[in-house]
Image (cartoon, helix red, strand yellow):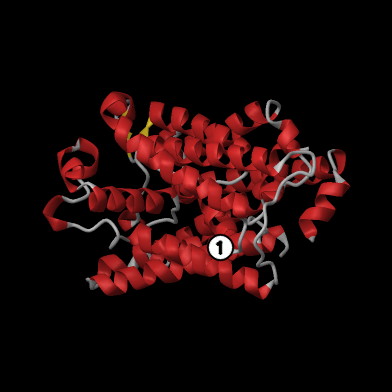
């Protein structure tokens, strides 16, 4: 799809979230709630005694029954539907032909670790902090956006062999 | 008057149903933008594909103009819409860590989930890394708690902090975005990598 048209579509979805639910879009938050729920299931004791996890289980709350968690399952459904429509569904590793599968997957894993760790610190990722934050004119949104893109440009030189 | 979740008391199932529908729209828009490809996303940082900035700023501007129009006509009460709270240090440090993750992994969490849904194995590994990252944060939280809560300023709005109206700020942002789009189009020609663009397209 034309990028500007896709941007309008994304903007309309964001506006819908603001109008219906009074909030923006998110992705890393839903991942966090899944992890919190998993830890709570595997080791209830640890979850209840931890300053971090315990707040998500207060008053019998269930982290999976949460707006952000359900929303990311929607992302999976919507992505799959779009991929099916445009015939892009296929199991494969996407990478530069100059690097091995192993290298691509190691960096993909590290990227995930860094991104979601940073998102917890900044209270949102590209979706929840940068995009949604900018749409409500929050300073946090603009600052996070500049930090993410600025840092990626700064580090791009070091990782250029993975991409170009 | 919107937000609907404030005007009506939504039962939990309806709130979550809307979450799912909005998420579906979000995933659909990201995938249609081509964001299920890490090589397309990474193009932003090497100049050969600048779709990221075009989609990102167009979306922000559409939501900004849309919400201000709805607010002007009394359809949406912007005071009831969540405004991100500012923690200066965490926003910058978290953002820098995220940027490093972006260039290593080639995805952000939303686009990673979207790529995972169409079968990209690298995106599945990225998501596994994301789960690990959230777990590491939770476990290290007691040690970084002070940093995580530092520099709190509340839900500050950028136009208010520089003393102009939201409409004027939006106008300035649109002008800045058009300039960036123009530079982005130039960059795509200057840093073109036909072989990558051809492969992404397939």
Q: Which of the two residues, B154 or B172, is positioned nearer the viewer here? A: B154
> Residue B153's x, y, as percent?
32, 32
Residues packed near mark 1 inside 10 Å, few (<14), some (14 to 19) or many (20 plus): many
Q: Residue at x 46, y 58 (%)?
A: B68
Location of residue A19 with respect to A115 vertically, above or below: below
> Residue B2's x, y, as percent?
34, 67
Residue underneath mark 1: B117
Q: Quadrant of the N terminus of chain A?
A: bottom right
Quadrant of residue B34 in the image? bottom right
User: Does residue A14 appear to the left or right of B151 in the view shown?
Assistant: right
Q: Residue at x 66, y 75 (%)?
A: A85
Q: Quadrant of the C terminus of chain A?
A: top right
Q: Which of the two residues, B41 or A107, is positioned nearer the viewer here? A: A107
Q: Regarding mark 1 in the picture, which secondary structure is present there? A: helix
Tally the marks.
Answer: 1
Q: Residue at x 33, y 52 (%)?
A: A33
> Residue A35's x, y, as percent?
34, 49
User: Does residue B37 appear to the left or right of B200 in the view shown?
Assistant: left
User: Does residue A59 appear to the left or right of B52 in the view shown?
Assistant: left
Q: Residue at x 56, y 61 (%)?
A: A10
Residue lying at the far left of the rendered structure: A59
């Amino acid at each position: 799809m034309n990028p500007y048209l896709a941007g309008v579509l994304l903007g309309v979805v964001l506006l819908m979230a603001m109008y219906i639910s009074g909030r923006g879009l998110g992705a890393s938050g839903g991942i966090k709630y899944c992890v919190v729920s998993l830890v709570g299931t595997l080791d209830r004791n640890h979850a209840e005694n931890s300053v971090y996890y315990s707040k998500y289980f207060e008053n019998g709350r269930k982290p999976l029954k949460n707006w952000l968690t359900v929303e990311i399952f929607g992302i999976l459904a919507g992505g799959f539907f779009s991929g099916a429509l445009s015939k892009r569904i296929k199991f494969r590793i996407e990478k530069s032909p100059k690097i091995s599968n192993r290298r691509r997957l190691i960096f993909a894993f590290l990227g995930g670790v860094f991104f979601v760790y940073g998102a917890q610190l900044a209270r949102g990722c590209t979706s929840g902090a940068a995009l949604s934050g900018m749409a409500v004119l929050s300073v946090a949104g603009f600052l996070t956006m500049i930090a993410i893109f600025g840092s990626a440009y700064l580090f791009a030189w070091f990782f250029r062999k993975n991409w170009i | 008057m919107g937000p609907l979740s404030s005007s009506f008391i939504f039962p939990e199932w309806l709130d979550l149903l809307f979450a799912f529908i909005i998420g579906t729209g979000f995933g659909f828009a990201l995938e249609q933008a081509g964001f299920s490809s890490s090589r397309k996303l990474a193009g932003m940082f090497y100049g050969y594909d600048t779709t990221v900035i075009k989609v990102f700023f167009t979306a922000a501007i559409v939501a900004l103009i849309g919400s201000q129009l709805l607010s002007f006509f009394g359809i949406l009460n912007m005071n009831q819409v969540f405004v991100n709270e500012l923690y200066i240090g965490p926003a910058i440090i978290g953002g820098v860590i995220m940027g490093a993750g972006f260039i290593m992994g080639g995805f952000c969490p939303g686009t990673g989930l979207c790529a995972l849904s169409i079968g990209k194995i690298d995106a599945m590994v990225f998501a596994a890394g994301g789960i690990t990252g959230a777990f590491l944060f939770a476990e290290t939280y007691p040690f970084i708690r002070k940093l995580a809560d530092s520099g709190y300023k509340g839900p500050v709005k950028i136009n208010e902090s520089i003393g102009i109206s939201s409409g004027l700020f939006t106008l300035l942002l649109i002008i800045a975005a058009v300039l960036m789009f123009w530079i982005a189009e130039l960059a795509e020609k200057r840093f073109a990598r036909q072989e990558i663009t051809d492969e992404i397209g397939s």
